[in-house]
Image (tube, helix red, strand yellow):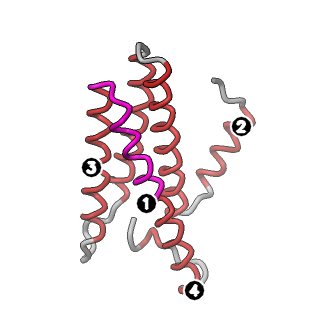
Amino acid sequence: MTVSNANMRYLEASINSATPEELIIKIYDALLLFARQAVEVMETRPTDIQGRHDLLRRAQRACALLMGSLRLDLDSEIPGNLFRIYEFWHHQLVAANMQGDPQKVRELLPLIAGMRETWVEAIKKYRAETKPGTQLGALVC
């Protein structure tokens, strides 16, 4: 699949103009996309080891980005707990890649989607309760 120059420019502009918390949602979207595509490849083309590997590596990179976005220096248990969740997801994606097991990824999908929705709701609530222009990213990620 190729991306046209116009689509690439749009994507770059949307990323460059996103707030830190919006970027977290975009990373979740990428993680879900690559994980779903990997499941599809493992189920429909089980001999396509390279295709599976490439998609699961992209999903693993998304997990690594989520881990790297956390403010572990905050006086809160939340970032550490999120780190452990993301680390578990990453481990499961690596295991699925090594074993060619779509079930390992399939089991993660509702967890990832649920966490994404939690972030969306937290961002909405935070924005509703704080003054305009304050970014959640300065506090959590």
User: Nearer the N terminus, badge 4 or badge 1?
Assistant: 1
What residue did someone put label 2 on?
7
Report the side of 126 relative to 17 (left or right): left
Q: Circle 3 sits in a helix, a strand or a loop, which is it? A: helix
Q: Circle 2 sits in a helix, a strand or a loop, which is it? A: helix
**Mark 3: few/some/many CA within 10 Å (<14, 14-19, 20+):** some
Identity of the residue drawn at 26% across and 49% down: 88
User: Nearer the N terminus, badge 3 or badge 2?
Assistant: 2
Identity of the residue drawn at 57% across and 74% down: 124
Q: Nearer the viewer, mark 3 or mark 2?
A: 3
Residue type, numbered disc 1 = Met
Q: Is residue 69 above or below residue 33?
A: below
**Gap in Å between the C-alphas at discs 2 and 4?**
34 Å
Residue type, numbered disc 3 = Glu
What residue did someone put label 1 on?
115
Q: Circle 4 sits in a helix, a strand or a loop, which is it? A: loop
Q: Nearer the viewer, mark 1 or mark 3?
A: 1
Q: Position of residue 55 (x, y in %)?
A: 45, 30
**Gap in Å between the C-alphas at discs 4 and 1?**
25 Å
| Quadrant in the picture for residue 133 | bottom right
Contact (CB < 8 A) between labels 1 and 3?
A: no
Q: Identify the magenta region.
A: 99-115
